[in-house]
Image (tube, rainbow, N blue to C red):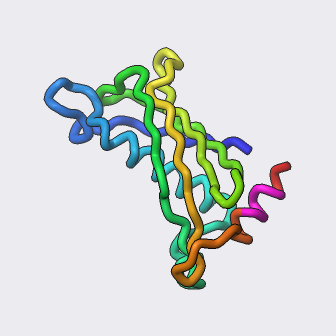
Amino acid sequence: MTHELKMKVRDYECDLQGIVNNANYQHYTEHARHEFLCERGVRFADLHQRGIDVVVARITLAYKAPLRSGDEFLVRSQVRKDGVKYVFQQDIIRLSDLRLACRVEVVNAVLIDGKLAAECPDLDRLLEENQ
């Protein structure tokens, strides 16, 4: 299952060099993950109220090409299960030339009532629906 979200770089996200500050790529991918799940009926606030927290365990970013103010880009997201982990693979693609700007892997763990859990029924359902 692939989700795509189009976004645009805002001036304040750039550093003195005129390129997007590296930390903002994490903001872009986090927003895209939330939209991806929300569109499929999974909301972190709802999960939290039920005692389920999906937390980031590790993020790996590989910067490939810079984004600059005004650039439009696409965040392409996929999710898979790897043992007890839910892994999001995300690519940020600059739309002007379709160049890969950043490749991101986000490894998530699930806590239920504060304890590590082997599964999250809501996320598992989402994965099963798209097999």
**Apparent side of residue 131 relative to residue 52 in the rendered image (left or right):** right
Could you say which quadrant of the image residue 70 lies in? Answer: top left
Could you say which quadrant of the image residue 63 lies in? Answer: top left
Q: What residue is at 62 percent from the left and 59 percent from the top? A: 37
In terms of depth relative to the viewer, which is nearer, 24 or 112?
112
Residue found at the far left of this picture: 16
**Magenta stretch contains residue 126:** yes
Residue found at the far top of this picture: 97
**Apparent side of residue 130 relative to residue 61 in the rendered image (left or right):** right
**Apparent side of residue 52 relative to residue 61 in the rendered image (left or right):** right
**Apparent side of residue 88 relative to residue 81 in the rendered image (left or right):** left
The magenta segment: 124-128
What is the x, y in percent for residue 107?
A: 55, 51
What is the x, y in percent for residue 47?
A: 59, 76
**Magenta stretch contains residue 110:** no
Q: What residue is at 81 percent from the left and 51 percent from the top? A: 130
In terms of depth relative to the viewer, which is nearer, 119 or 16?
119
* Vertical position of residue 106 compared to residue 74: above or below: below
Q: What residue is at 54 percent from the left and 33 percent from the top? A: 91
Q: How many marks?
A: 0
* Vertical position of residue 78 compared to residue 93: above or below: below
What is the x, y in percent for residue 121?
A: 73, 71
Quarter that holds the N terminus:
top right
Magenta segment's dominant SS is helix
Q: What residue is at 53 percent from the left and 19 percent from the top? A: 98
What is the x, y in percent for residue 117?
A: 64, 72
